[in-house]
Image: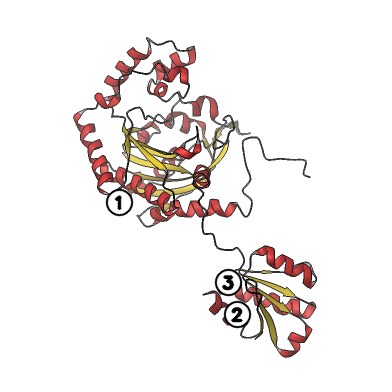
């Protein structure tokens, strides 16, 4: 038993379960790759100020949940708590927005870190796949991203998820709503921290999950009643485009999400089989974020989908993904000469794309065949001294139990044909 364990609130991805996570990442990324999104990867840590400015100094993420450190050189860094600010920073630094082809469409996958109270579906280290469309203000982009996420979930077989949709307005209409909301909230019985939040960012109060707060929000002014004509028209076009694509959604006037940079379109994907941690992903438009972090005006939209939460959603619906076996052929040598010859055949099989493994460690026939069974291989290759003398290898079908001799020189082509 090791002295060390994974830190509290984290987890290890271990075979065979790790294959589900890889399959989910692939399924989410697939529609993005076929829609013009290129892959981007950013460092696991960034300057603290990037998140303070971008995510918002009043958010729980910045005030309570970021893992921060000071380097020996005196730099203040933070493990990334979300992906959008990092991706936009990288795009600006590389001048992707100046290449003359807007929007810049990017997708990414990776681990993110937040210091939160660990519970099922909420970890301190978690995995996401995200997508960002940078540099264009177009309702069709917002709709595209929502449709692609819906497509990804449905390709996995999920059906019990809902899409919640709202508009947060823009710099023209939100200040009027903000003032009305602040007036309402200041009349409530709130604790000191929440009252401070009313002054800094009152929309965060709407996102408060405590029942004591939610019970007082009945009758709170709704942003949809304060939207300017331009925001109303924009939001209505997003709704029409999503509906025309056959994607069902629900209007949620209280949906604000937990980040300060969202404007206009905001959305969340929730799964009712996950209990209190029902959100499996979400996103929205963030037209002012580039300017917040020192870049030019670049209206943008994006989302992030939780791989961990999606796996839990699959389990809640009882969905087993069709994951190919890690090993198709398992080689069992009996003797040193057989070991040399079969190892060469395993290498040949791998070169032509056949997943093959080998009985390492000089195992006897009985132990090696047990390993072959545990590997999930469809076929076993057994080679002994008599087989070598005859120039053949024994090919055993692990499902039917049938065994036949195949020429050593023909075995690679034979297995290619059998495995398709």
**CA distance separating discs 1 and 3:** 40 Å
Circle 2 residue: 412
Circle 1 residue: 101
User: Tags 2 and 3 in contact by the CB under 8 Å rule?
Assistant: yes
Query: Dot 2, how many residues are within 10 Å of its Cα: few (below 14), some (14-19), or many (20+)?
Result: some
- Which residue occupies 66% across, 75% down? 401
Q: Residue furthest bottom?
A: 390
Whether residue 18 sits left or right of residue 313 in the image: it is right
Q: Secondary structure at mark 3?
A: loop
**CA distance separating discs 2 and 3:** 9 Å
Vertical side of 14 occupied by 379: above or below: below
Q: Position of residue 286 (x, y in %)?
A: 35, 35
Q: Position of residue 274 (x, y in %)?
A: 50, 38
Q: Which of the two marks, 1 or 3, is nearer to us in this view?
A: 3
* Number of disc labels: 3
**CA distance separating discs 2 and 1:** 47 Å
| Front residue of 101 and 335 | 335
Q: Which quadrant of the figure contains the N terminus?
A: top right
The numbered mark, 2 or 3, whose residue comes first in the sequence reads: 3
| Front residue of 401 and 131 | 401
Q: Position of residue 41 (x, y in %)?
A: 49, 48
The numbered mark, 1 or 3, whose residue comes first in the sequence reads: 1
Circle 3 residue: 354
Q: Quadrant of residue 165?
A: top left
Q: Secondary structure at mark 2?
A: helix
The numbered mark, 2 or 1, whose residue comes first in the sequence reads: 1
């Amino acid at each position: 038993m090791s002295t060390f364990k994974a830190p509290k609130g984290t987890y290890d991805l271990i075979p065979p379960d790790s294959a589900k996570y890889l399959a989910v990442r692939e399924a989410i990324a697939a529609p993005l790759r076929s829609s013009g999104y290129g892959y981007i990867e950013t460092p696991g840590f960034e300057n603290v100020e990037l998140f303070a400015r971008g995510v918002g100094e009043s958010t729980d993420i910045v005030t309570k949940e970021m893992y921060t450190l000071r380097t020996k050189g005196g730099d203040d860094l933070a493990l990334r708590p979300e992906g959008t600010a990092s991706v936009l920073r990288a795009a600006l630094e590389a001048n992707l927005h100046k290449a003359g082809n807007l929007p810049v469409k990017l997708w990414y996958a990776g681990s993110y870190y937040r210091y939160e109270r660990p519970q099922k579906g909420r970890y301190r280290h978690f995995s996401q796949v995200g997508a960002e469309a940078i540099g264009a203000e177009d309702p069709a982009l917002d709709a595209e991203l929502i449709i692609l996420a819906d497509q990804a979930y449905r390709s996995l077989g999920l059906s019990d998820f809902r899409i919640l949709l709202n508009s947060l307005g823009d710099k023209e209409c939100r200040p009027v709503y903000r003032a009305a909301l602040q007036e309402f909230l200041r009349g409530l019985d709130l604790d000191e921290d929440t009252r401070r939040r009313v002054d800094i960012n009152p929309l965060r109060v709407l996102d408060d999950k405590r029942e004591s707060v939610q019970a007082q929000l009945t009758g709170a002014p709704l942003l949809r009643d304060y939207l300017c004509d331009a925001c109303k028209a924009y939001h209505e076009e997003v709704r029409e485009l999503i509906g025309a694509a056959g994607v069902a959604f629900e209007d949620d006037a209280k949906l604000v999400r937990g980040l300060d940079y969202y404007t206009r379109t905001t959305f969340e994907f929730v799964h009712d089989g996950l209990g209190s941690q029902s959100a499996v992903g979400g996103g929205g438009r963030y037209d002012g974020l580039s300017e917040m972090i020192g870049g030019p005006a670049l209206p943008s939209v994006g989302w992030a989908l939780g791989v961990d939460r999606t796996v839990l959603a699959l389990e809640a619906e009882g969905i087993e993904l069709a994951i190919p076996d890690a090993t198709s052929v398992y080689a069992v040598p009996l003797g040193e000469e057989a070991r040399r010859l079969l190892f060469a055949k395993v290498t040949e099989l791998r070169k032509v794309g056949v997943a093959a493994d080998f009985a390492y460690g000089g195992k006897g026939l009985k132990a090696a065949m047990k390993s072959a069974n545990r590997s999930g291989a469809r076929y076993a290759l057994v080679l002994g001294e008599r087989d070598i003398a005859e120039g053949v290898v024994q090919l055993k079908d692990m499902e039917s139990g049938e065994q036949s001799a195949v020429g050593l020189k023909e075995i690679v082509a034979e297995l290619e044909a059998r495995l398709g």
